[in-house]
Amino acid sequence: MSGRYDFASDNVAPAAPEALAALARFNTGFAPAYGSDAVTAQAADLVRAFLDADAQVHFVASGTAANAIALAALCRPFDAVLAHEHAHICTDETGAPGLFGHGLGLIPLPGGSGKLTPESLAGPLSQPHLAHRQSAAALSVTNATEYGTVYDSNELAAVVRPAREKGLGVHFDGARLANAVAAGFDAKSLRHYCDIAVFGGTKAGGTPAEAIVIFDPELRSRFDARLKQAGQLPSKARFYAAPFIGLLEDGALLRHAAHANTMARRLADRLPFPIRHAVEANAVFADIDEPTLARIHASGWFVHRFLDGSVRFMCSWATTPEAVDELGDAMRGLA
Amino acid sequence: MSGRYDFASDNVAPAAPEALAALARFNTGFAPAYGSDAVTAQAADLVRAFLDADAQVHFVASGTAANAIALAALCRPFDAVLAHEHAHICTDETGAPGLFGHGLGLIPLPGGSGKLTPESLAGPLSQPHLAHRQSAAALSVTNATEYGTVYDSNELAAVVRPAREKGLGVHFDGARLANAVAAGFDAKSLRHYCDIAVFGGTKAGGTPAEAIVIFDPELRSRFDARLKQAGQLPSKARFYAAPFIGLLEDGALLRHAAHANTMARRLADRLPFPIRHAVEANAVFADIDEPTLARIHASGWFVHRFLDGSVRFMCSWATTPEAVDELGDAMRGLA
Amino acid sequence: MSGRYDFASDNVAPAAPEALAALARFNTGFAPAYGSDAVTAQAADLVRAFLDADAQVHFVASGTAANAIALAALCRPFDAVLAHEHAHICTDETGAPGLFGHGLGLIPLPGGSGKLTPESLAGPLSQPHLAHRQSAAALSVTNATEYGTVYDSNELAAVVRPAREKGLGVHFDGARLANAVAAGFDAKSLRHYCDIAVFGGTKAGGTPAEAIVIFDPELRSRFDARLKQAGQLPSKARFYAAPFIGLLEDGALLRHAAHANTMARRLADRLPFPIRHAVEANAVFADIDEPTLARIHASGWFVHRFLDGSVRFMCSWATTPEAVDELGDAMRGLA
Amino acid sequence: MSGRYDFASDNVAPAAPEALAALARFNTGFAPAYGSDAVTAQAADLVRAFLDADAQVHFVASGTAANAIALAALCRPFDAVLAHEHAHICTDETGAPGLFGHGLGLIPLPGGSGKLTPESLAGPLSQPHLAHRQSAAALSVTNATEYGTVYDSNELAAVVRPAREKGLGVHFDGARLANAVAAGFDAKSLRHYCDIAVFGGTKAGGTPAEAIVIFDPELRSRFDARLKQAGQLPSKARFYAAPFIGLLEDGALLRHAAHANTMARRLADRLPFPIRHAVEANAVFADIDEPTLARIHASGWFVHRFLDGSVRFMCSWATTPEAVDELGDAMRGLA
């Protein structure tokens, strides 16, 4: 068989039809560049409505850049960001926060199944400022988490509250916000405890597109220049706004996310391996020993061992029940 | 009348049908992420064939980022880049080279109609290194230039040669490479005198996409990590490769560029203003006084006064003869 | 004869006896590190008294670093600093503001004899913010200027006022503040229109030491961490504070500066060349053609041709009338 | 009693008489600035002789800056440095490597008593390069270590060898090189396995001064500009060179270091607490519970709990046997 990437990540999927149709629909006529066009305005309105927030919205190409730019807006180079030790910014972005933030620090914190807790933050938040180390100036939280678990709104608010009380800014990495919302997270709660968020379109069925959502008015000034300097103020901006319109205007975003979540639960039921974390979003993490993983790879299925030692299977809007069942059958044959 | 942006820039145009069709064509099935997919490989082959070069090719989202990343690869922070004083990197990228290059310097040089000459470089290249200033380590050239003029291959080689002899790296900003080639520039000459180039897709009729082309093997190591840290290693990479396939596989790129160039010459013939620079690519620069420009703006046509004091009219693949004539008529009414 | 560096700069001089004596005086016993020692506290009090200001004071090793760190505190990377085109930060610091400021921009402005005027600032201050370029967020002024001229307090206040009204921060480069004050500038005026200043000790007769003086309370937070990350939070801090005590406690700083200024005027009277700029501080700039300068260098006197084309002769606390007369005689022999 | 800082660190000590005398001795006449003076040349010769190496030597003000600049010379921003998890660069420099290195990463590694071993490096060195994380491009080693232990030359060579074989650059943090050499480390071995080193003067009895020693010729180009941009090319350079002359010309450096090491062993014998690490250089780390430490602080002795949980007592050239005995007596009264 040829290689099967379906479950390697949710960014191996094509764009959903609604996103691609919107690209085509808005590909007519001339439009002002750099985000002053009507398509961008309409998409920003849809994002604001989704979050029920009077936020400033910018559409960019890259989640890595979006996260790093947001953190650079929250921190000075001698400040640090508190984040889960396996957060994407800590483990998978090649030090982008340090590049865009000019050396800003990351303080990785432990936490079960990708979640921070008020307890895991208590120690770091009680540290006095010292000239000799980077002190925390921001907290970064991710929902759905890297381990496919989901904070509910109260839970996340409880994690964030002590940081806010200490004066830290709050960054929300919503690369899989859609999956979290489909699992019950209230997107409209973000405006109450978040200063700046990245709302992911790419993994949600879009062509590459992410929205930076600025809740805190003090962070908004000259943000267009900040983005331009960082290579994230697209000239043909409508192509980053259009997929958000396609995904948001009639609910496709949440339909697709709910489907992906359902596929993950279906897969968890069919895998012959112990499941490591609660399957609340679109990922399944299974305990698989090295010889078994080698057999899985040899049979053509590309899945990755993760930082916690388990193996990740991702579902997406494009995952079919048939593919899940085929994978489940294959795994049972290899276990 | 409503606002007319047609001639404000070539990035106000939609994507050409070939680019959008390719996006749709490759939007099927699952593909490995981050550039290891077959679509990216095919597009890179087409870029190499277009340039007749055994180069390493990366597709990214932004020309500003691509230029800045290329310059950061050529220079250390205490080095500087020689460039035309009105080059895009000097005037329109909000200091992106300094951000990505950690403070690297730009040394702006004069030159008629956007072109550098061996004479304009002679002084800067003869400067001794001093600890107290950033010394030139790279030369950046742009073709077609910001003023719609085009270096031919020998002319550009003559500009670049003394810099190479001094050991400087050479960066080529090809945001409008297609227009230059349609005007006679030999793209296959680049490999002889260029270390790293940015080959523009966006203004050439693409959805947002640029190619970084690395000729110098010494610049290639870990370039994927360099891009990832800079937020320019797209996960769904095929969407940045596909438009290059659409534009390159059957010659649409050059057809569209030739059309844009033709439209610019047509426009130059119809404008009732003195034309400032030779119309060799897709731009026309006209001498227009402030009251006249105010009337032009008041009548709904968005065009910009440029750094040399003239007013720029840009054509693109989407410019029609009818629109050119309509604009010409309107201008004659306002002159 | 052997080389004569006396007039090459004011940093070729040794330390004044008062500075060196203070180093020795405070070189006893153990002292807490990193600026929490009593010597540092005493020196900071003397600086505050000199400036009649309730400022936060940090002693550092380098004027280049001090300027760059101050500008980084005032600007974000997508902001720019307005400064005289021949200001030290623009011409002699190898892009340090860009390194410490992560790519922040410098906007060089013209102005006679090293001085900015309200007129030279009017255009730049009226520029609207655009995403595509770095907009001014700070103004940097230098007194005494690079050309040995001196703003009086009202003159400088008039230059700064329109920038402050536009919301720009103000940085004061006081590498030669002592010479300016000896020439009549009121150091106690700084607190009214300056956010952050660098008060130079090195050229004023110190061992290497500069003071960063923070007037604006909003810039003070975690400044110790900012300095530590930038390599400018000295462990044995007393050695940077002591020379300020030596120079300030009994007026040596101004005595030495007045002497240097007097020597410059004496030299101007004796040089057989046209004098380019008003001799108000400790520098003399003379019009000297290239063959004559070659003869000067050949006879062993090291002086530099400057950016405005004239040749600079610097005096310092250590310049003697005899040396001035010797130089004058020598120059008359070579003219 | 008043506060006693004697044992808080080795940077609380004054400068040794030889260092201060050299400052005074060379404080005569005019000298070219920025390191082209004879004092700097003489000090560089002494450093080369001490290390028996044909190295390029630069004198700077700050060890933190020196380390960070050296690492920035070895790594690109998307590279990382392997270092002991408690190395000064990882724990006490406020992210300076990230500031000077534009976001370069640090990969902290465990190791007993501050030492790395070939075993602790084996895993990190076997990691394949991935675009998604910063890959190791350099190894940083410290001798004497942060825990007062000392690698001998063979031991250090064995740690470094596998890194060099993988192509990593090697940085040596010699803030306490003198103490290591006094304990038996062969300084002349460094040239065989080290690319760039920081040779500490400050803690060795100097006024603030460190030497950057560049063994690898490829790292030398434009290093003066690198330093100037980083605020570490002193104008009055002789004041950073002179203490090295004073300390090196007649062996004071090693005499003082040997004394400090002896004092540490004397102290270890007198402390009534378990000693955590081998006392090989000038530090003693003792196991002290929190109530006892509180009593120690209350009685006026300033010592710090360290990252490994033990409490550090530092000796220096200025530590007297009497003070050691006084401290020992005091501690026995508080234990």
Image (cartoon, coloured by chain):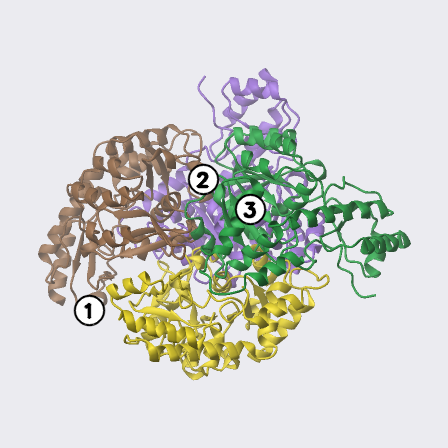
Chain colours: A purple, B brown, C yellow, D green
Q: Are marks 1 and 3 on the same chain?
A: no
Task: Give the amino acid at mark 2.
Answer: Pro
Return the residue at label 2: D217
* Amino acid marked by disc 1: Arg
Q: Residue at x 71, y 46 (%)?
A: D258
Look at the numbered disc 1 and give the secondary structure of its residue.
Answer: helix
Q: Quadrant of residue C276?
A: bottom left
What chain does badge 3 belong to? D
As shown in the figure, which amino acid type bears the numbered disc 3?
Answer: Val
The span from disc 1 to disc 2 (Cα, nearest Å) is 63 Å
Residue D216 placement (x, y as % from top left) = 48, 39
Residue placed under numbered mark 1 in the picture: B295
The secondary structure type at the circle numbered 3 is: helix
The chain holding disc 2 is: D
Residue identifier under label 3: D47
User: Residue A130 in the image: x percent, y percent?
Assistant: 66, 57
Q: Are marks 3 and 2 in contact (CB under 8 Å)?
A: no
Q: Taking B170 as reference, is C203 left or right?
A: right
Whether residues under marks 1 and 2 lie with C-beta atoms below 8 angstroms apart, the answer is: no
Q: Are marks 1 and 2 on the same chain?
A: no
Q: Residues within 10 Å of mark 3 (few under 14, many from 20)?
A: many
